[in-house]
Structures are given as C-alpha cells and as structure tokens.
Amino acid sequence: MHLPLLLIAGTLTVASCASKKFGDEKLQTKLETSDKKTSEKIGFDKDRNLILQDKTNASDELMTLSHVNEELQAKLQNEFQQLKRCRVELADVRLGGTGEMAPMPDVDGIKTDPTLKESVGIDESGELVFVRQESFEDRLKAEKQFEKSVRRLTKVISSNREQCELRMRKARVEHGLPAERTPAVTRYEGGQVIILQPAERNLDDAFQFANQAKQK
C-alpha cells in the first residue's frame, strides 16, 4: 500500500527547487485516518509517524492573517500615541521636565513592500484593464514576518508606556495635580448624558481643573 505524503500541519509548504513555480507542486493531503468533526485531521505519514494536519484554503489563510495584522497594527498605533503623549507631558517644565521629549521608538519600515507587476491590456471580455499582481508566496511570508515584528514592537512600546506613566503619576502629584488624568464629569438627565466638564486633554486642562477645584 502506498501511503500519502505528509503535509506539515498549519504551514504552507513550498518546493525549493528553482525550476518549479509556487503552486506547481501537487500535494496529497488525504490522510489514512482522520477526525471528521473538525478541520484538523490525524493520520499516518509515509514513515508511519502519527501526525496532525490542518488544511485551509490558501486565500482564506492569507485573509485571516491580514485581518489579524490590521488589529495588531491598530493596537500598536494606540500604544505608540499613548507613549508619545506621556513623554510630551513628562518633558513639560511645569512637571519638572527639561522641555525636550525623550526619543520615540521607530515604528516605520517594519513591513516589507511587495514587489508588484503592473500591466495594461485587454482581458477575456475585451475590456481594457489595469492589472496589478504580486507573488502569493512573498505576500504570505511578508504578512507572517510583519505579525512577528508588530507583536515584538508592541511589547517594547507597551513596557515603555507603563514605565513612563509611573514617572508621570509621581511628577503630577509632586506638582499639585491628581496622579491620574481627570475624566469627564457627566450627568444623566432627561434620557441624555450632559457633559459638565470635558475630560482632561492636556496639561493646560490639568492645571486649569486643579485651580478650579481649589477655588471651590
């Protein structure tokens, strides 16, 4: 009996032979035995090793990874903006700063731009079209590398933000401000939320609110 070849679980394998194009290699993905209840299958490879295999549509895999990366990038930008605000305020002379903000981590250039092939021509229906193409394999590799880079950089920026905010709370208390930024003061009336005082947007607001509180 000839047993099926092994498709490594959770990965998209590509032949390294220079004479083959990506997608040319025909892969046998049917296992000797499988679990029909999930997309993950269990079975034996040609060497009688028991393995787990998960097979998904290639475009679905890329789309899922792209969506994950969009969410990770949004989180990175949020952490970056919070760190920048903290460092700007901590540098303010009113909090004992020097007036110069500490350098920010570089978040640019962490994603590789794809190599695109652009063409203008007539398609099958006779319509003049502009076509942009890129290597699926290169795009998949770029998205996976981007995910690793974003996760690593987010961890670094988040750690810096937490350290900055600790110093910020200490500096605010030492200069007569509450440790935390002042939230909005609201009142619920007639089915609507009435804003009595907006949330603190910057240090100007912080000192203004603090002076108003002293005068009450």
Image (cartoon, helix red, strand yellow):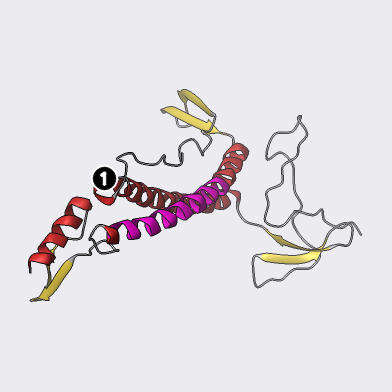
> Residue 185 sits in which quadrant?
bottom left
Q: Quadrant of the N terminus?
A: bottom right
Kindly report the secondary structure that dominates the magenta region of the rendered protein: helix
Q: Position of residue 214 (x, y in %)?
A: 12, 66
Q: Position of residue 134 (x, y in %)?
A: 55, 33
| Residue appearing at x 45%, y 37% in the figure | 108
In the image, 128: left or right of 22? left
| Residue appearing at x 51%, y 33% in the figure | 113
| Residue appearing at x 32%, y 49% in the figure | 90
Compared to residue 89, the image places residue 193 above or below, namely: below
Q: Position of residue 147 (x, y in %)?
A: 55, 48
Looking at the rendering, the stretch of residues picked out in magenta corresponds to: 147-172
Of residues 178 and 158, the one drawn nearer to the viewer in this rendering: 178
Q: State yes or no: residue 126 in magenta.
A: no
Secondary structure beneath label 1: helix
- Write down the residue under mark 1: 93
Compared to residue 20, the image places residue 80 above or below, namely: below
| Residue appearing at x 40%, y 53% in the figure | 164
> Residue 174 sits in which quadrant?
bottom left
Question: What amino acid is found at the position of numbered circle 1 in the picture?
Answer: Val
Q: Quadrant of the C terminus?
A: bottom left
Q: Is residue 126 visible?
A: no
